[in-house]
Image: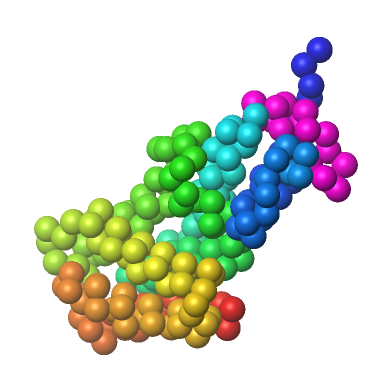
């Protein structure tokens, strides 16, 4: 009789695996489930084995990130929305550093590579809105701009979440994003206000 899959057990194993990996603990089937009340068979029931667990763990990071970014309601200011997406990305990284570490470990295959692109698509959509609304000059490549925005957010989040920079360093995103969006055609002072409004959601003191 097939074993029933329990979503709570799946989440427990994913979170524990991510934490052990980030803290560089030796990971075996036994060490993974030790003290959890879960049997080693649960790894096979939910993931088909350790390789499946690592793929699912990496995928889970992107799934949670996409859910956080999707929860942001678009406003009438798409430049502000671009910055807000970056702030939400950074908050996700700082709030769940274990999964964040695993998300970008290319040593493990993703279960669904297309689904992992969902977060980037939200940035692309905001960039398209900014161009259509006249904030960015016609012909601006929304994918390129979204990618550069992601690079800025990812770089700062990584340096703060994994060291060596303090949380206050996240404030550097405002001038960096402002410079990026001004280079795409936005007016500097208006751009700065939009970026400050969007980026203000990030926990600066983390």
Q: Is residue 182 left or right of residue 30?
A: left
Residue at screen point 77% across, 28% down: 41
Direction front: furthest residue? 26
Residue at screen point 40% across, 37% down: 114
Q: Please tell me whether residue 71 belongs to the stretch shown in magenta.
A: no
Q: Please tell me whether residue 40 belongs to the stretch shown in magenta.
A: yes
Residue 110 x %, y %: 48, 38
Q: Quadrant of the N terminus?
A: top right
Q: Is residue 175 left or right of residue 138?
A: right
Residues rendered magenta in the picture: 33-48
Can residue 112 be seen in this snapshot? yes
Q: Is residue 87 left or right of residue 194?
A: right
How many badges with numbers are in the image? 0
Corner quadrant of residue 148: bottom left
Q: Quadrant of the C terminus?
A: bottom right
Residue 119 x %, y %: 43, 52
Corner quadrant of residue 195: bottom left
Corner quadrant of residue 98: bottom right
Residue at screen point 72% across, 26% down: 45
Q: Is residue 152 left or right of residue 169?
A: left
């Amino acid at each position: 009789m097939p074993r029933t899959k329990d979503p709570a057990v799946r989440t427990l194993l994913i979170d524990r695996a991510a934490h052990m990996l980030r803290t560089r603990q030796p990971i075996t089937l036994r060490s993974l489930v030790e003290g959890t009340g879960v049997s080693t068979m649960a790894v096979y029931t939910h993931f088909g084995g350790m390789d499946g667990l690592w793929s699912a763990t990496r995928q889970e990071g992107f799934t949670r990130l996409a859910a956080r970014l999707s929860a942001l309601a678009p406003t009438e200011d798409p430049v502000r929305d671009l910055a807000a997406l970056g702030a939400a990305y950074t908050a996700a990284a700082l709030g769940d550093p274990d999964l964040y570490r695993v998300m970008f470990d290319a040593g493990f295959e993703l279960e669904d590579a297309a689904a992992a692109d969902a977060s980037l698509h939200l940035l692309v959509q905001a960039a398209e809105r900014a161009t259509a609304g006249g904030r960015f000059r016609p012909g601006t490549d929304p994918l390129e701009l979204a990618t550069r925005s992601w690079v800025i957010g990812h770089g700062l989040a990584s340096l703060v979440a994994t060291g060596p920079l303090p949380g206050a360093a996240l404030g550097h995103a405002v001038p960096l994003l402002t410079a990026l969006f001004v280079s795409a055609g936005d007016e500097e002072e208006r751009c700065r206000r939009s970026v400050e409004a969007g980026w203000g959601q990030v926990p600066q003191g983390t």
